[in-house]
Image: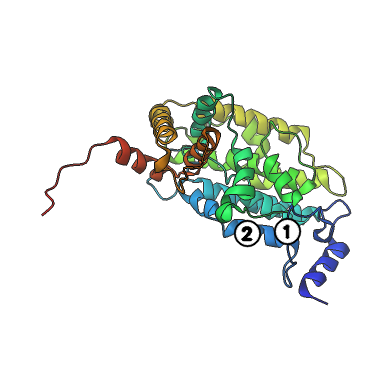
Amino acid sequence: MLIREMLEEREKKILSPYASLSSKTKGRKRKEKECILRTAFQRDRDKIIHSKAFRRLKHKTQVFISPIEDHYRTRLTHTLEVSQIARTISRALGLNEDLTEAIALGHDLGHTPFGHCGEDVLNEILKHYHRHFKHNEQSIRVVEVLEKGGKGLNLCFETLDGIKHHPQKEAMPKTLEGIVTRISDRIAYLRHDIEDAVRANIIKKKDLPKKEMKILGENILDTIIFDIVKESQNRSEIKMSKEIKGAMDSLYDFLYERVYTNITAKREEVKIPTLIRLLFRHFLYNPKNLPFYSKKWKNEEILQRTIDFIAGMTDRYAINKFKEVFTPSEWRDSY
């Protein structure tokens, strides 16, 4: 028996009846020879970790624009924290930890530079072309089309579904692992955005709402995770108690008012629309400057390639590219 087959058999024996089994995956769009060592979901996880888009997350904004200080979260560290939380919950509930990890690691691959501000600007630009931009949909495009030279990563249906439906406004994922990741995303940024906001002196610990903090306690992660596990054990759904969910929602409202829309925290964001709009216009009307340019591209292809290029930029790459395109260089003699 192959090691992969042993792992698949182990899943059948130890996982919850509500878990997604690797051997029962709905499969990939293109058939692949199965791995001797790894299950289908383990391969998805590994494909994502080794992708270029995953590496770029280290220089993409989480909340604070292109932070110089080492200890602020970036999109990559956020992704790793989501993965840790989601894996902890999945393991405790007997769900498929490998699928959960693959979804968590891939959920933000399509995020723009400069966080949600960059996403909003790109979406506004595309309204003029009767299009829209959502980072979760771009994440799907990254893994299905853009990676591996246009071949995509060819991930399993369950992984794609979890990535596509991780935002709160989307329909619920079709697997419990996807739902766990969706909740873990929210838990992660509630906790780490508080920590980063305190470090940035945007808020002080004493400013946090007392009622909610009394419910959630000093260690927010433990409280919320324990509650989810307690409420969801041996169930076909992922639940939270009304008390904990209410405290989480109220704390999010506090962060939205005091951090996410804070003038000091967002003072640099006023520059982002101009930067992205000018870069977008430049590459749209000068497609020869886009990577892998081809004379065969039609207008729609040029538009899509421009979207992909802008969305894929890291914060610092976007800033440097803006300087390169729009800032005149000093004259130097050729000798």
Q: Nearer the viewer, residue 316 or 301?
A: 301
Colour scheme: rainbow
Instruction: Determine the residue located farthest toward the top in the rendered image.
Output: 128
> From this viewpoint, is residue 82 visible?
no
Q: Residue at x 88, y 65 (%)?
A: 13
**Which of these two is toward me, 82 or 118?**
118
The residue at 46%/49% (across/down) is 292
Q: Residue 184: x and y, percent?
A: 67, 44
Residue 80 place in picture, x, y as percent: 58, 52
Residue 308 location in percent, x, y?
52, 41
Let me know if residue 297 appears in the view: yes
Residue identifier under label 1: 41
- Amino acid on which the number 2 mark rests in the picture: Lys
Task: Where is residue 77? Give x, y as percent.
Answer: 53, 50
Find residue 270 and report its image quarter: top left
Q: Is residue 126 left or right of residue 181?
A: left
Mark 1 closeness class: few <14, some 14–19, many ≥20 residues within 10 Å: many
Nearer-N-terminus badge (1/2) = 1
Compared with residue 40, is residue 323 higher up or lower down, i.e. above or below?
above
Q: Which residue is mark 2?
A: 47
Q: Secondary structure at mark 1?
A: helix
